[in-house]
Image (cartoon, rainbow, N blue to C red):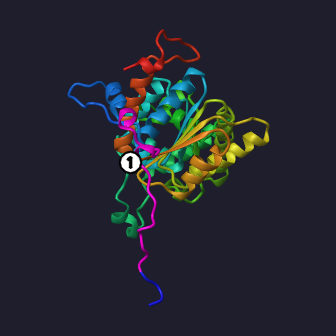
Amino acid sequence: MRYRPIDLDGVTTYPLSERKNKVVMAEHKAGEIRAGMTVGELLAALPDQLGSQSLRGVIDAMAAAREKGKPVIMAMGAHVIKCGLQPVLRSLVEADLITAFALNGAGSIHDYEISLIGATSEDVGAVLHAGLFGMAEETGRDINRALKEGVADGLGYGESVGRFINAQQNPFRHWSLLALCAERKVPVTVHVAIGTDIIHQHPSADGALLGAATFHDFRLLTSVVAELGDGGVYLNVGSAVLLPEVFLKALSIAQNLGHHVDHFTTANFDMQQHYRPLQNVVKRPTAGKSMGYTITGHHEIMLPRGELSWNARISNRCSPRRRRSAPWWSAT
């Protein structure tokens, strides 16, 4: 053969003590884990590496954003709603940690059904071939009615449905994110592609109303995105395509209109990292002087843990309406 195994006798080496290392145990090791720790203590005990470093980076950014009165936006896929995380979302609203939400159409549907009957998420495979998938009467009838009434009053998709839930006094409205946001005047926008949601199958569906409602919300979200500069935070939780695309366009409009959106933080939370969230949330928008993070895990596990961590680190935070006596980093 032409080639022979290379001779390593001439390889030069240098002392390990001269090498620069990325992990220094005195600085990066985990702390002691013990029974009875507070969430703040557990968070502080995590090693200053990789995923825990990213999680703390997001928490720090959220704390700093609320210190400065900057928005923290949470964009969510429908899975976040349908796996029962409304109590977590409610606590984030009540704590003034999340200041705006963006949903896809399916998220608003799950939220509405939970507010009405305390349950959601049909077995698609069991009913698809019978032509019954998505044909539950109340879901399409009520949401399409809510949009008709809301658009007539100049409202967008999210506020229209939230207002309708409260007006109808749906029995389980205390679990509804849309109802809570409508009541507290927290921006909640819903972004739909016609033909993707079950309410578009119903006789009461009106494409013009759907378009008007979601276009209103697109412009509303853009107004919030325009304020992200100099310290705001944008979180994408479980939306692989639609909401990352919406965010990119909203950011482009804000920049085009002269809002300098830089020095902000983004993060993508999902069980696996997809192309569009990575490009349109984590990388492209932060190419200037901003920071993007990826947090990988299941929503039903990560969001409750994240909420405990955020509350632990920001429990005494200040807001535009209230100052605290102790800095946020001292909270446990």
Q: Is residue 54 left or right of residue 206?
A: left
Question: Is residue 204 something one can see in this rendering?
Answer: no
Looking at the rendered structure, the kind of residue marked 1 is: Gly
Please report the residue visible at 59 percent of the width from the left and 41 percent of the height from the top. Answer: 157
Please report the residue visible at 39 percent of the width from the left and 38 percent of the height from the top. Answer: 24
Q: Residue furthest left?
A: 35
Instruction: Tell me the quarter of the image containing the N terminus.
Output: bottom left
Residue 223 location, x and y as percent? Answer: 69, 35
Q: Is residue 200 left or right of residue 95?
A: right
Quarter of the image holding residue 186? top right
Q: Identify which residue, 289 or 9, lies in the foreground.
A: 9
Please report the residue visible at 59 percent of the width from the left and 43 percent of the height from the top. Answer: 147
Residue 50 location, x and y as percent? Answer: 42, 44
Q: Is residue 155 left or right of residue 297?
A: right
Residue 162 location, x and y as percent? Answer: 52, 35
Q: Which residue is mark 1?
A: 297
Q: Which residues are magenta?
A: 5-28
Residue 144 shown in magenta: no
Please report the residue visible at 35 percent of the width from the left and 43 percent of the height from the top. Answer: 300
Badge 1: residue crowd in 10 Å (few <14, some 14–19, many ≥20): some
Q: Identify which residue, 246 or 215, lies in the foreground.
A: 246
Q: Identify which residue, 267 or 82, lies in the foreground.
A: 267
Q: Is residue 173 above or below residue 203?
A: above
Q: Is residue 2 above or below residue 10?
A: below
Q: Residue furthest front?
A: 10
Number of labelled discs? 1
Instruction: Tell me the quarter of the image containing the C terminus.
Output: top left
Q: Residue furthest top?
A: 325
Question: Is residue 90 something one can see in this rendering?
Answer: yes
Q: Secondary structure at mark 1?
A: loop
Quarter of the image holding residue 160? top right
